[in-house]
């Protein structure tokens, strides 16, 4: 009886392995950057989201950005936090302070600020929201600053210092955070 089921199970396992291999061959970064079928696949994040113990002095619901760690924490109850990997500002563009989320947008449009255009005149003057937009799937605007916590069409930059001061997250992570916080949420940026 066991032999009767062994062959079909082995065949299913082989087909799954072949299909899994085909899926791996089909995957490339354009699936994430360009919104392909793997756009929200969690495996795309080089720094996985996780719940950690957190002993900071911040109230639950506060976002704490630690630029030196290149991590963003959403403080939870009972001494815990959700930890996300982020991309931060490159040398000369990191900053610190306390702000509030003043706006939230899904698939936001992007208009590079004049300071960025002065450095990069090749950039478009405006881009409609969408999968090719560098702000990604969601954006949370920080006070009256030019900075945002936003998604990215370059997930390989998570954990690195490459932005002009904004905090980049994978589209999966920024969508998760976006659903957990509201306008008025305090954001503490630690620049050690």
Image (tube, helix red, strand yellow):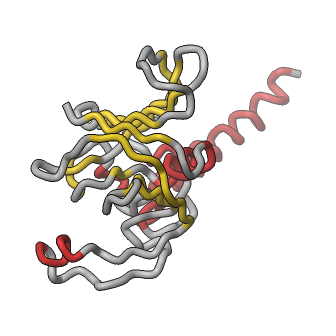
Q: Nearer the viewer, residue 8 or 70?
A: 70
Q: Nearer the viewer, residue 45 or 140?
A: 140
Q: Position of residue 38 (x, y in %)?
A: 54, 58
Q: Position of residue 112 (x, y in %)?
A: 29, 74
- Residue at figure coordinates x 57%, y 26% from the top left: 76
172 relative to 31, above or below = above
102 left or right of 7 in image: left
Specify the quadrant of the image occupied by residue 106.
Answer: bottom right
180 left or right of 103 in image: right
169 left or right of 93 in image: right
138 relative to 131, above or below = above
- Residue at figure coordinates x 54%, y 48% from the top left: 184
- Residue at figure coordinates x 31%, y 55% from the top left: 166
- Residue at figure coordinates x 48%, y 75% from the top left: 129
191 relative to 42, above or below = above
Q: Position of residue 58 (x, y in %)?
A: 46, 24
Quadrant holding the N terminus: top right
Quadrant holding the C terminus: top left
């Amino acid at each position: 009886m066991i032999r009767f089921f062994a062959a079909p199970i082995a065949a299913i396992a082989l087909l799954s392995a072949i299909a899994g291999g085909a899926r791996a061959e089909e995957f490339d970064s354009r699936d994430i950057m360009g919104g392909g079928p793997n756009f929200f696949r969690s495996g795309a994040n080089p720094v996985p989201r996780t719940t950690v113990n957190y002993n900071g002095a911040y109230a639950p619901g506060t976002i704490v950005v630690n630029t030196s760690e290149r991590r963003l924490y959403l403080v939870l109850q009972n001494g815990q936090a959700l930890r996300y990997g982020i991309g931060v500002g490159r040398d000369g563009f990191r900053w610190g302070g306390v702000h509030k989320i003043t706006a939230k947008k899904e698939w936001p449009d992007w208009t590079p600020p004049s300071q960025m255009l002065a450095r990069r005149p090749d950039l478009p003057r405006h881009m409609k929201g969408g999968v090719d937009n560098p702000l990604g799937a969601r954006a949370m605007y920080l006070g009256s600053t030019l900075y945002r916590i936003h998604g990215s069409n370059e997930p390989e930059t998570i954990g690195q210092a490459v932005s002009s001061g904004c905090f980049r997250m994978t589209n999966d992570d920024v969508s998760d955070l976006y659903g957990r916080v509201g306008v008025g949420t305090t954001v503490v940026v630690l620049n050690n």
